[in-house]
Amino acid sequence: MTSANAPYVARDLAHVWHPCTQMKDHEHVPMIPIRRGQGAWLEDYAGQRYLDAISSWWVNLFGHANPRINAAVRAQLESLEQVILAGFTHEPVIALSEALTAVAPPGLTRCFYADNGSSAVEIAVKMSFHYWRNAGRTQKRRFITLANSYHGETLGALAVGNVELYKQIYKPLLMDVITVPSPDCFERAGGESCADHSRRKFAAMEAALAAHAHEACAVIVEPLVQCAGGMRMYDPVYLTLLRAACDRHQVHLIADEIAVGFGRTGTLFACEQAGIRPDFLCLSKGLTGGYLPLSTVMTTDEVYAAFYDEYAKLSAFLHSHSFTGNPLGCAAALASLAIFREDRTLEANRALAAHMGARARELEDHAHVAEVRQRGMIVAIELVRNKATREPYPWQERRGLTIYRHALTRGVLLRPIGNVVYFMPPYVITPAEIDLMAEVAREGIELATCA
């Protein structure tokens, strides 16, 4: 470790407990203290730069220290930094709600704010349950979820997810849910299209809805990409079928677009690719361009009306967060949406996505690459021990860690999910930076699979 970084690492390890980390790893895995960011790059105290290929946990859209978002937050800071949103309001939250309503699937007209993705999922789950209770359908109290899904770490969000690594230890604390096989196209049969596979896998969801509609509040899904589950992807036809089935069985549809929203899949919202409108749309991460913690649950006038009554009826939705609708976060989100609009970001991303996919697909013939898959600005490379049988590497071997550590030495931040190397960079990345990212990933994969 360089002397310039060492004091910060020592101070950190004396007091900071890091997320999603076995802290003992830092006895041999370097901690990287970052002093500044610019565009797609991060810089440590020794002056070493790192290409942020994962958008700092999928949040950053338009680069670090983006001057337009900086200016918006700075201007807001001079007038109002925070105010209670119960009984009070402010221009940024009004404007953001109007802007989101204008770009979201038609019919999503109400915005309920929180400060992180897990909280948004908690809100959607509670709101769906409470809706049915207000409607007199008190037997509806369960949720249907997909295998390999992830919706956050708070207890409600954890319960409706299905990644065992995060969920197993806390199962005694969690509500019981109905889990349906995922439409994950990595599991499709030889010669079967992703659309046909997703359509075939929907039969299990249809059966679950038929059996449990009387007791089910909602189905919750990550549209098109199960991100924390290894960037596994499925076809939009599944969402089209799901929307129709939820309507038929009178069950809500919750779309968790916390990770896949705001252009990640190629459209502003992944649901657009199926032509559907969920009953609840959960947004966070890229909502503020990755600047500040903010989330929202968008829903319909119909859901809103179920809670609108005299106070004595006790039908109001009393969920609250101290920083709900924070003005600084709303200002950042408005600036981010303005960049989408003014720079025609989704169109510009098509060329970047094509280049990123082409570079990643150069690895398709690698002896230990089972699949290279892509949905918009998300690319994943799945490593296996045996390409013919798709036998995975044992997780205990931590081959992704080898790739992570190699990438750091080459000035790139990659953070594989198990044996899946993925790219989810900021939209300001250049073709040359994509070339670097792909080359470093190739080198890391060679190192990780050579033994």
Image (spheres, helix red, strand yellow):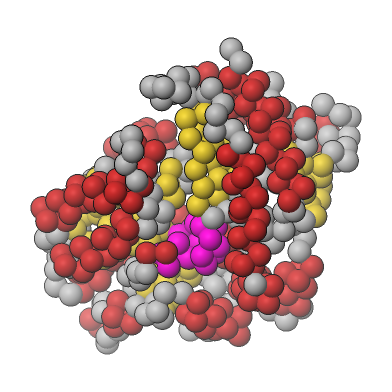
In the visual, does 418 lie left or right of 314? Answer: right
In the visual, does 304 lie left or right of 435? Answer: left
* Residue 354: % across, % down: 61, 53
Which image quarter is the C terminus in? Answer: top right
Judging depth in this view, the residue of 350 and 324 nearest the camera is 350
User: Based on the displayed image, in which of its 4 quarters is residue 408 positioned?
Assistant: top right
Furthest residue in direction top, as rendered: 451
Furthest residue in direction front, as rendered: 191
- Residue in view at x 69 percent, y 72 percent: 343
- Residue in view at x 34 percent, y 46 percent: 193
- Residue in view at x 66 percent, y 30 percent: 442
Tell me if residue 107 can be seen: yes
User: Based on the displayed image, in which of its 4 quarters is residue 118 positioned?
Assistant: bottom left
In the rendered view, tell whether residue 233 sits above or below residue 104.
Answer: above
Which image quarter is the N terminus in? Answer: top right
Main SS of the magenta part reads loop
Number of disc labels: 0
Question: Range of the magenta residues?
Answer: 257-272
In the rendered view, tell whether residue 69 sits above or below residue 235.
Answer: below
Judging depth in this view, the residue of 265 and 160 nearest the camera is 265
